[in-house]
Amino acid sequence: MELGGNAPFVVFDDADLDAAVEGAIASKYRNAGQTCVCANRLIIQSGVYDAFAEKLVAAVKKLKVGNGLEPDVDQGPLIDQSALAKVEDHIQDAVSHGARVLLGGKRHPLGQTFFEPTIVVDVTAKMKVAREETFGPLAPLFRFETDEEAVQLANDTEFGLASYFYSRDIGRIWRAAEGLESGIVGINTGLVSNEVAPFGGVKQSGIGREGSHYGMDEFVEVKYLCFGGLDR
């Protein structure tokens, strides 16, 4: 049973920022942000916050919005008007609490349910985007100072489906991977799903796994055989 998520995407100060931006594009904007494992909260260390934001803006500007059946289109429409309204509500709430829109922030000129790929900075835990899954092309950038704060921010949600982080320090990688409360953890990658990996979450993101031999366990009855008297 898979019940959605609120995936954090953490970028530590030793990360390869170009790779992190590439991963963020893959995780945040695919299917217009409408997958359960899409990055919902981009949590960036202070030392690289501005540099990451600048690189992300440059990359997102290159995304082409349009009919997904046409060549070279990167982002299609949202599923319905309610989804569109939710993205607008999250942006309005963030801005009203002090966030700034760096890119996008409004409906696309194509109309219907198309929305501009959006980046918002100076986001805090008090805003709706921290608690609710946007399910749209909105990338809110949170700021953190220490590794412990990053894990705390990432885990500050009732959900625990997927999480992502970028670092080149092997000690930091193991500490973060063990500390994150998620059923799926992408380490230096924004693409985590494949048919041979166990898919599923913890906390309010569901029960059980699908895929891999762990997914087969859901369809298997375990029989316990207790032998005695074989030496008589």
Image: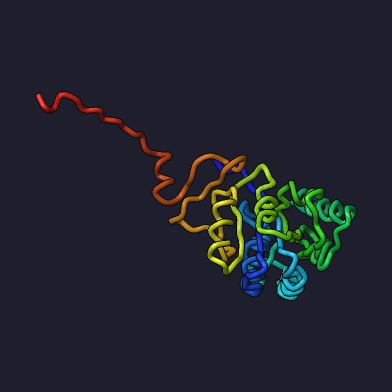
Q: Nearer the viewer, residue 220 or 32?
A: 220
Q: Residue at x 68, y 63 (%)?
A: 29
Q: Nearer the viewer, residue 114 or 22?
A: 22
Query: From where the camera sits, is residue 138 visible?
Result: no
Q: Residue at x 25, y 28 (%)?
A: 226
Query: From where the camera sits, is residue 86 visible?
Result: yes
How are the residues colored? Answer: rainbow
Measuring from the top left, give residue 196's x and y in whole percent: 43, 56
Measuring from the top left, give residue 100's x and y in whole percent: 86, 62
Task: Tell me the quarter of the picture where residue 165 sits.
Answer: bottom right
Q: Residue at x 53, y 58 (%)?
A: 174
Q: Nearer the viewer, residue 192 or 174?
A: 174
Q: In the displayed structure, does residue 170 sit left or right of residue 87?
A: left
Measuring from the top left, give residue 179's x and y in whole percent: 58, 51
Task: Tell me the quarter of the picture where residue 71 sits.
Answer: bottom right
Q: Nearer the viewer, residue 79 or 1?
A: 1
Image quarter of the N terminus = top right
